[in-house]
Image (cartoon, rainbow, N blue to C red):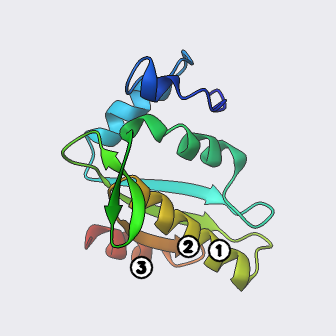
Amino acid sequence: MNYCNGCWTCWWKTPGECIHKDDMPELYQSYMNSNLVLHFSPLEMGFVSSLLKTVNDRCVPLVHPYMAMVSGECHHQKRYDKYPLFGLIYDPADADAEDIEITKDLYTRMTLNLKTEMKFFSSNQKPIKELTHEISHI
């Protein structure tokens, strides 16, 4: 998976399509055909892994470049009618409470920009039965 290089081709020249020829088109299709997308990541240096950050950055083509005011904030307009709900299961590793809160806030903002909601944010240190119960009741 290639890093986003910020060329904005996915918005202006080939709307909805990135210039990189990698596995992201399959991921986009899976995302958009899902009701819930769960991300899993260790917290490294206070945030999700670089691989997951790359995936998040590469989700830019899922929205339009055009802006609209939403609750007094500028946000991108939808490209699709329906977007999946999101969740993050994280391994806190050596993260502290502030790192976890910052990650939650940033992920919540990301989902807001992707026209969806963060429905699940939890540590992998919860018992598996508790995690599965919470996820199954979203």
Relative image position of residue 120 (x, y in whole percent): 41, 70
Relative image position of residue 132 (x, y in whole percent): 37, 69
Residue 135 vs residue 56: left or right?
left
Residue at the bottom extreme of this rendering: 97
Residue at the spot of label 2: 105
Indicate the secondary structure of the residue bearing disc 1. Answer: helix
Instruction: Give me the C-alpha separation between circle 1 and circle 2.
Output: 5 Å
Placement of 41 over or under 58, stated as above or below:
below
Residue at the spot of label 3: 130
- Position of the N terminus by quadrant: top right
74 and 79: which is toward the camera? 74
**Residue type for callout 2:** Asp
**Residue type for callout 3:** Glu
Residue 85 vs residue 26: left or right?
left
Instruction: Give me the C-alpha separation between circle 3 and circle 2.
Output: 23 Å
State which mark lies toward you, 3 or 2.
2
Q: Residue at x 67, y 29 (%)?
A: 5
Residue at the spot of label 1: 102
**Residue type for callout 1:** Ile
Contact between marks 1 and 2 (CB within 8 A): the answer is: yes
Q: Which image quadrant is residue 79 in?
A: top left
Q: Earlier in the sequence, mark 3 or mark 2?
A: 2
Q: Earlier in the sequence, mark 3 or mark 1?
A: 1
Kindly tell me whether residue 21 is visible in this rendering.
yes
Kindly tell me whether residue 124 is visible in this rendering.
no
